[in-house]
Image (tube, helix red, strand yellow):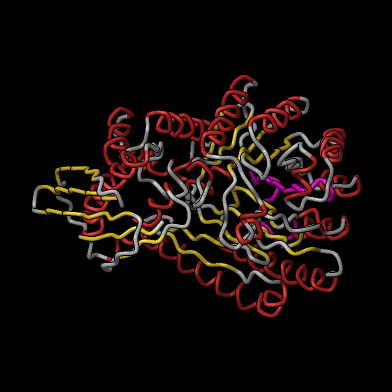
C-alpha cells in the first residue's frame, strides 16, 4: 500500500504516521513527494495558535472517494517544548487514525498508541495524583484508547501495586538480567540472541568465563556501594541449554558475588525449552533454592511445533512439567502464542484445554509478532497465519479462560507488527506474579544486563531518565570484549548513583 502524505513538513511526524499506517495495511510505504503511482492520498491541514490546534485530514482513494476527519483541541500551556509538541502530535495522529478507521472500517482499540508499555501512562497518572476517572478520560481523549483496553490497563496497574506496594520506591535498588545465548534450535519467530548449542562447547566455555567475570565485578561494586538486588532473571536463549555442572557453577558464582542473595525477592530461570530439562538440572536449581522456572509449550499442536522449529514433542512438555513439579518447582510459568502458523480458534482451544490439565502458577499469552529479523518474517509466504477477526477471537478465549480459572492479568506489553494490533498479557494465580516482569515493563528500576546480548537499562534514581546499553549479541565478540563492556557499565552505574547521592545530600 503506497500512501501519499501531504501537508506535513515536520519530519518528526514521519515515524508515527508510518507506524499507524502499518496497523491498517501490510507492506505500507509513505511518500512525501508528489507522485501519481500511489493507492491513496492523505492531506493534512494544521492550524496551530497559542491556545488551540485544529487538524483536518482528508483521505482520497483511486475512485475519488473522500473521507475527512476534523479535530480541534485546546493547547495546554506548558513550559516544555517536548510536551507542547506531544499535544500537537497526538491531535494530528488522532485525526489521522480516525480517517483511516472510517475508510477501512477497522477499529484500533489501542488508539494511536504504538509503544510497547501502555500501562506506564496510567502509572504516571497515579503518581501525579490524578483520579481514575480523570486519567481514563485523558486516555480516551488524547490517545483514543477504547474503554476495554483502559479497563485492562487499570486492572493491571492495581494488581502491580498490590503485588509490589513499593513499586515507585525501587529506584535505589537494581535487578539483574543474565543472558545465556544458547538454545537447542532457533525458533522461526525468534530474534533473541539464541545460538544452536550443539558443537559450540568452546564458545560456551569462553562465554561462561566472561559471564562469571561480569558477575564478580558487578557484585563487588554493588557490595561496595551497599545497593540491594530486588530480582534476578536468567533468560536467553534458554538458560537450561548449558550442562548441569555449568549451571551449578553459575549459581555458585551468584551466591559468592552478589550481595545478600538470601534476601533477593525473586530469582527466575527460564527453562522454556522442555528438551533442555533434566532431573540433574532440576536438582541443581533445587540445591540453590531456585523454584521459579518456565516450561513453555507455545502450542499443544505437534505440527505447529515442527513448523516453528521447536524440536520437543507435546508429550515431552507435559512430562517435563510433571517432573519439575515432582522436584519441588513450586512456581512454573508457561508461555502460549496466539496466531502461530496454521492455527485458529480450534487449535488454540485445544491448547487451552491441555493447559487446564497442568494449571501452571502463571501463564503468559503472547500474540505472534512478525519481528523484522526473524526467519518467519523473511519467509512470510511459508508461514500462513490467521486473520484479524480470528486472532481477536483467540485473545477473547484466553481472557475468558484465565478469568474462569482464577488467573489475574498483572503485566502487558505490545510489539510492532503484532497480529491484530493486540497485546501480550501475563496472567498469574494469586501471589504468584513475577516481580521482575512488573519491574521491566514499568521501567521503575535499573536492570543490569550481564552476558551475551544482555541489554542494560539504567534509570536515574531521581529523574527517571533512561539510558540503554547492550552487550554484543554474538559470543565471539562478547568473549573478546567482556572486560571492556563490564567497565563501561560500572562507569555508568557509578555516575548514576553518585548523582543520586549528591541530590539527596
Q: Viewer-proximal residue, 405 or 220?
A: 405
Q: In this view, does 364 lie above or below 189?
A: above
For residue 47, side relative to residue 405 (left or right): left
**Residue 349 in sight:** yes
Q: In this view, does 333 lie above or below 245?
A: above
Name the image quarter holding residue 481.
Answer: bottom right
Write the residue at 83% across / 35% down: 318
Relative image position of residue 497 (x, y in whole percent): 47, 62
**View extreme (right): residue:** 280
**View extreme (top): residue:** 404
Which quarter of the rendering shows the N terminus? bottom left
Q: Viewer-proximal residue, 445 or 39?
A: 39
**View extreme (bottom): residue:** 480
Relative image position of residue 396 (x, y in whole percent): 55, 28
Which range is magenta? 255-276
Q: Does the magenta stretch include residue 271?
A: yes
Q: How many labels does the image show?
A: 0
Write the residue at 71% across / 61% down: 194
Write the residue at 50% across / 41% down: 420
Relative image position of residue 22 (x, y in whole percent): 43, 52
Which quarter of the rendering shows the C terminus? bottom left
Write the residue at 41% across / 64% down: 499
Q: Does the magenta stretch include residue 247?
A: no
Q: Viewer-proximal residue, 162 or 117?
A: 117
Relative image position of residue 37 (x, y in whole percent): 34, 64
**Residue 434 in sight:** no
**View extreme (front): residue:** 63
Amino acid at each position: 500500500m503506497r500512501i501519499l502524505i501531504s501537508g506535513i513538513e515536520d519530519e518528526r511526524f514521519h515515524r508515527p504516521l508510518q507506524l499507524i499506517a502499518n496497523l491498517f495495511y501490510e507492506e505500507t510505504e509513505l511518500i512525501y513527494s508528489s507522485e501519481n503511482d500511489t493507492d491513496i492520498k492523505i492531506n493534512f491541514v494544521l492550524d496551530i495558535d497559542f491556545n488551540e490546534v485544529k487538524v483536518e485530514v482528508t483521505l482520497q482513494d483511486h475512485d475519488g472517494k473522500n473521507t475527512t476527519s476534523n479535530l480541534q483541541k485546546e493547547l495546554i500551556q506548558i513550559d516544555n517544548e517536548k510536551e507542547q509538541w506531544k499535544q500537537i502530535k497526538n491531535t494530528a495522529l488522532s485525526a489521522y487514525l480516525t480517517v483511516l478507521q472510517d475508510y477501512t472500517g477497522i477499529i484500533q482499540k489501542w488508539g494511536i498508541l504504538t509503544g510497547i508499555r501502555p500501562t506506564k501512562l496510567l502509572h504516571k497518572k497515579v503518581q501525579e495524583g490524578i483520579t481514575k476517572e480523570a486519567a481514563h478520560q485523558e486516555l480516551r481523549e488524547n490517545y483514543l484508547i477504547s474503554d476495554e483496553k483502559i479497563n485492562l490497563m487499570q486492572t493491571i496497574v492495581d494488581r502491580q501495586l498490590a503485588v509490589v506496594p513499593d513499586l515507585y520506591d525501587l529506584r535505589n535498588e537494581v535487578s539483574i538480567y543474565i543472558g545465556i545465548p544458547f538454545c537447542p534450535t532457533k525458533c522461526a519467530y525468534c530474534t533473541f540472541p539464541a545460538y544452536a548449542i550443539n558443537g559450540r562447547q568452546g564458545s560456551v566455555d569462553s562465554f561462561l568465563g566472561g559471564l562469571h567475570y561480569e558477575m564478580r565485578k558487578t557484585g563487588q561494586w554493588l557490595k561496595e556501594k551497599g545497593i540491594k538486588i530486588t530480582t534476578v532473571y536468567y533468560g536467553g536463549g534458554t538458560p537450561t541449554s548449558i550442562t548441569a555442572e555449568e549451571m551449578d557453577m553459575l549459581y555458585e558464582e551468584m551466591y559468592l558475588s552478589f550481595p545478600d542473595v538470601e534476601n533477593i525477592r525473586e530469582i527466575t530461570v527460564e527453562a522454556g525449552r522442555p528438551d533442555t530439562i533434566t532431573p540433574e538440572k532440576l536438582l541443581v536449581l533445587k540445591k540453590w533454592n531456585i523454584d521459579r522456572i518456565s516450561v513453555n509449550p507455545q502450542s499443544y499442536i505437534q505440527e505447529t511445533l515442527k513448523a516453528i522449529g521447536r524440536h520437543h514433542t507435546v508429550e515431552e512438555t507435559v512430562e517435563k512439567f510433571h517432573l519439575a513439579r515432582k522436584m519441588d518447582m513450586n512456581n512454573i510459568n508457561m508461555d502460549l502464542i496466539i496466531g502461530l502458523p496454521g492455527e485458529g480458534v480450534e487449535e488454540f482451544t485445544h491448547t487451552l484445554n491441555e493447559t487446564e490439565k497442568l494449571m501452571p502458577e502463571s501463564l503468559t499469552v503472547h500474540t505472534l509478532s512478525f519481528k523484522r529479523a526473524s526467519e518467519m518474517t523473511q519467509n512470510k509466504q511459508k508461514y500462513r497465519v490467521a486473520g484479524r477477526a480470528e486472532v481477536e477471537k483467540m485473545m477473547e478465549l484466553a481472557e475468558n479462560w484465565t478469568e474462569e480459572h482464577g488467573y489475574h492479568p498483572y503485566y502487558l506489553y505490545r510489539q510492532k507488527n503484532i497480529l491484530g494490533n493486540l497485546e501480550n498479557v501475563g496472567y498469574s494465580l494469586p501471589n504468584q506474579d513475577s516481580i521482575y516482569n512488573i519491574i521491566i515493563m514499568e521501567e521503575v528500576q535499573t536492570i543490569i544486563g550481564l552476558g551475551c546480548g544482555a541489554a542494560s537499562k539504567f534509570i536515574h534514581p531521581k529523574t527517571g531518565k533512561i539510558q540503554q546499553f547492550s552487550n554484543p549479541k554474538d559470543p565471539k565478540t562478547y568473549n573478546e570484549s567482556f572486560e571492556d563492556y563490564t567497565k563501561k557499565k560500572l562507569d555508568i552505574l557509578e555516575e548514576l548513583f553518585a548523582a543520586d547521592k549528591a541530590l539527596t545530600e
